[in-house]
Amino acid sequence: QVQLVESGGGTVQPGGSLTLSCTNSGTIFSNAIMGWYRQAPGKQRELVASIRRDGSLNYLESVKGRFTISRDNTKYTLFLLMNTLKPEDTAVYYCNINQWEYGTNKNYWGQGTQVTVSS
């Protein structure tokens, strides 16, 4: 079982920056894909960025060049550096781990952290 806890959300003005962190407890397997999702009011949850063990990255088109996902490989702490924030980035941001555990695919979520971009 994996438990995820996000932190770092808050309110920031347009053009500002925030860094989200996601700490975990439990066993992270080598096949894990770690990522950040977000969900704005009235919209579906969407993948913002993900990172694989080999370091390969994937970003939502609208955040490319502004957001950077990274990982502490010793503790598997996950980060999301968000620069040049826009009002449309306002959402609840969720940390996610998807991994195969002995032949079973498991999907874990944090409780979410609110990011509000407003002047």
Image: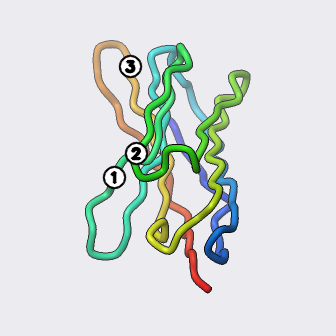
The colouring scheme, among rainbow, by chain, secondary structure or one colour, is rainbow
User: In 3D space, how far apart are the residues under numbered discs 1 and 2 (Cα atoms)?
Assistant: 8 Å
Residue at 57% of width from left, 75% of height from top?
A: 117
Q: Quarter-wise, where is residue 102 in the image? A: top left
- Residue labelled with disc 1: 46
Residue at 50% of width from left, 47% of height from top?
A: 95
Q: Is residue 39 above or below residue 64?
A: below
Residue 81 image offset from top left, x and y in percent = 66, 49
Packing grade of label 2 (10 A; few <14, some 14-19, many >=20) is few
Residue 28 image offset from top left, x and y in percent = 54, 24
Residue at 39% of width from left, 31% of height from top?
A: 98
Give the structural element (helix, strand or loop) at label 2.
loop
Q: Is residue 13 visible?
A: yes
Give the structural element (helix, strand or loop) at label 1.
strand
At label 2, which amino acid type do we have?
Answer: Leu
Between 35 and 2, the residue placed more toward the observer is 35
Marker disc for residue 101:
3
Q: Assess whether mark 2 and mark 1 are in contact (beta carbons under 8 angstroms).
A: yes
